[in-house]
Amino acid sequence: MSDIDLFILFLEMSCFSKDEARTISYYFFNNYSKSMSEFVREHLLSKCKTDSLSATLLKFSKAYDDLNIRNKIKSVVDVNHHELIKGDLHIHTNWSDGNNSIEEMVEKANQLGYKYISITDHSLVNKGRIEMNPQKFLMQLEKISEIQRFYEIRIIKGIEVDVNENGSLDYPNEVIKMADLVIGSIHFDYGKGDIKSLELLNQLLNNEYVDIIGHPLNKIGQKSFLKNLDKIISVAEKNAKVLEINLSPDRIIESEFLVKYLGSSNIMFSFGTDSHTRKQMELINISNLWIDKINKESILNTYEDPLKLIKKKMDKNSR
C-alpha cells in the first residue's frame, strides 16, 4: 500500500466517501507541504458529521504522520486477516458514539467472513459525552435479540463500560450481568495521572464482571505499566482477565508493547478494532502484525465460542 492509498483509507474510515477522499488526497499531495494532522485541523475537521468522527480523523492523521507507525500499517492493512480470526470483539454503533447502525456493522462482519461480532457500545454515564445509560442499554439488548433473528452470524451483546473515580463501574451489577461480554476501560484519570489510572486498572482486573481490559495502557503509559508489570500479569492471570490488543492506528505502539512484554505470559488476549464506522472494521488486518508472535491458543478471537472459553477460565480460577 502506498502513502496515498493509506491517506485515502484513513479519510474513508472517518468522515468521507471514497470519491471525496480521493479528491482531498490529490489536493494534499500536490498543494500542501505540512503534515496530515495539520492539514486535517486546517481543512477537514469542520466537515465531519460528529465530534467523534472528528476525533477519529485527528487520531488517525497523527498516526499517519509517524513514519514508523505508517510503515507498519502499510505492510499489513491490505492483507486479509488470518483465517483463524473468527470475529471482532470491540465494535461501536450509533447507539453511543459510533456512526453506523447495528445492522450495518453486522452486514460488514458478514462480508469479512466472521462467525460472530461483539457490539460493545460505550456506557460513559455522566461524563459529558454521548452516553448509553442502563435503560438505553437494556433497550439495546432487546434490539439485538430482534436483529439476531435475521442473521446466522452470532451477535454478542457486549458493553464497553467505564470505571469511575471510586472504582465502581458505570452500571449496577444487576445490569452488567445481563451483558454477554464486558470490556472494562479507563478513559479518564480524573485529573490524577498515571498513579490513579493504575489504581483503576487494578479495580478492573479484580472486578468479577469484567471479561476484557480495553486498551490496557490508556492513561497509564508504558513506563508506569512496565514498572508494575509483574503485579499486572499476576492479577490478570489469577482472575482470568483478557487483555485487548487494540487495532486502532493510534494505539499501534501500545499494542506492540503488550505483545513484547506479555506475549509469552499465560494471559489471554483479544483483538478489537474499536470501530466507530463500518469501514474501520477492516482494521482487523492490523492483527497480522502480531498474530504470529502470540500462541494462537491465547487469542480469544480464534475460538468458535469465545464466551464459553471465558466462562471456563473464570470457573477454573474461582476454584
Image (cartoon, helix red, strand yellow):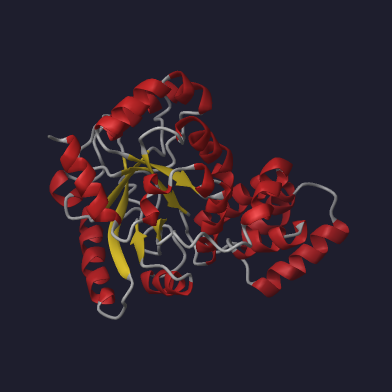
User: Up-down: is 217 above or below 2?
Assistant: above
Q: Which residue is drawn at 47% across and 59% down?
A: 276
Residue 1 seen in render: yes
Q: Residue furthest bottom?
A: 150
Q: Is residue 246 above or below residue 85?
A: above
Residue nearest the viewer, comparing 173 with 301: 301
Which residue is drawn at the image coordinates 17% and 39% (left, top)? 316
Residue 165, visible in the rendered structure = no
Q: Where is residue 29 in the image (x, y as percent from the top left)?
A: 83, 59
Residue 126 lies, in percent from the top left, at 31, 44
Left or right of residue 58, residue 4 in this image: right
Give the camera-side residue of 239 and 132.
239
Residue at the far top: name it: 227
In the picture, measured across the screen, residue 169 lies left or right of residue 172, that is: right
Classify residue 152 as left or right of residue 21.
left
* Residue at x-position 38% and y-position 37%: 186
The residue shown at (65%, 62%) is 9
Q: How many labels were placed on the picture? A: 0
Q: Residue 163 location in percent, x, y?
A: 31, 37
Looking at the image, residue 155 lies above or below residue 201: below
Measured from the top left, where is residue 162 in percent x and y?
33, 42
* Placement of the C terminus among the 4 image quadrants: top left
Which quadrant would the N terminus be assigned to in this image? bottom right
